[in-house]
Image (cartoon, rainbow, N blue to C red):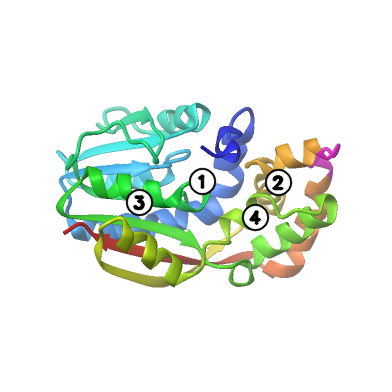
Amino acid sequence: MSDDLRKFGGAIPDLYERGMAPVIFAPAAVAVAARVAKLGPGRVLETACGTGQLTRRLAASLPAGTAITATDLSPAMLERATTGLPEGSGVALRPADAQALPFADASFDLVLCQFGVMFFPDRARAMREAARVLGSGGRFLFTTWDGRETNPYAQVAADLVVEATGETGVFGLAYGMTSLDEVRVLAQEAGFTGFRAEVVRLAAPVPDLGLFAAGLLLGNPTATLLHERGLEPETLVPELARRLRGTLGEPATARLQMLVYEAVKP
């Protein structure tokens, strides 16, 4: 279990949801939910659901009667996801570690993980767990970010964090799982077949650069890293907003590049 995942508490979920999610997680969730709708699964499991950006879109786009279970390791993130779901959505939310899922074998038709696999300390074990809970013919659909060089906002934020702390922190983990061969081997060793990958490029408006900058520094464990180095994250927000303004243009637009993977359980 990653200490970074445990640190998604306190004020982090709110700033994650208000600052980062509208710009980088919501557009990705729309794209992933559209793919899921075409697959038409009857039983869906989402791991590392965070504040529920993808969860809400699944509930809105999948037919009534689809059984959706969304899990996360952080109780604080899961609570934020709960408050964001419309009443009567029918989504079952529960705490769970993607590396040790509390579900029976062959319980689902589709397992989803949006931007979570990179943070799992034992990725191979998480892959095996996804395969275990899938029925024959089931699919594991998951996404990672491509490198920081293809997501300029992340490169700007990482550069500032490195200047302040000497470490990339979360920006190293989140944008560091980019080897197609590495992911293919993980999927194959977990027993998956039919592996395929696709690069997806998106562009998202940034209506409030200050709020986006606050999300990047305060809406994830970067805030903890900065505190540990004796820095107040809030003091760096204006400088990050200034740098983002110079990089994202006018009107400010975030270029996003993610990798979408799909693997089939034989």
The three-letter amino acid code for the residue at tag 2 is Leu
Q: Residue tagged by mark 4?
A: 171
Badge 2, how many Cα within 10 Å: few under 14, some, many 20+? many
| Residue 71: quarter of image | top left
Which label was assigned to residue 127? Answer: 3
Dot in front, 1 or 4: 1
Which is nearer the N-term, disc 2 or disc 1?
1
The three-letter amino acid code for the residue at tag 3 is Met
Residue closest to the eye, 223 or 100: 100
Kindly report the distance in space between the C-alpha atoms of the residues bearing marks 4 and 2.
Answer: 10 Å
Q: Secondary structure at mark 4?
A: helix
Query: Could you tell me which quadrant the C terminus lies in?
Result: bottom left
Kindly report the distance in space between the C-alpha atoms of the residues bearing marks 1 and 3.
Answer: 12 Å
Dot in front, 3 or 2: 3
Which span of residues is magenta-colored?
A: 229-235
Which label was assigned to residue 176? Answer: none
The three-letter amino acid code for the residue at tag 4 is Phe
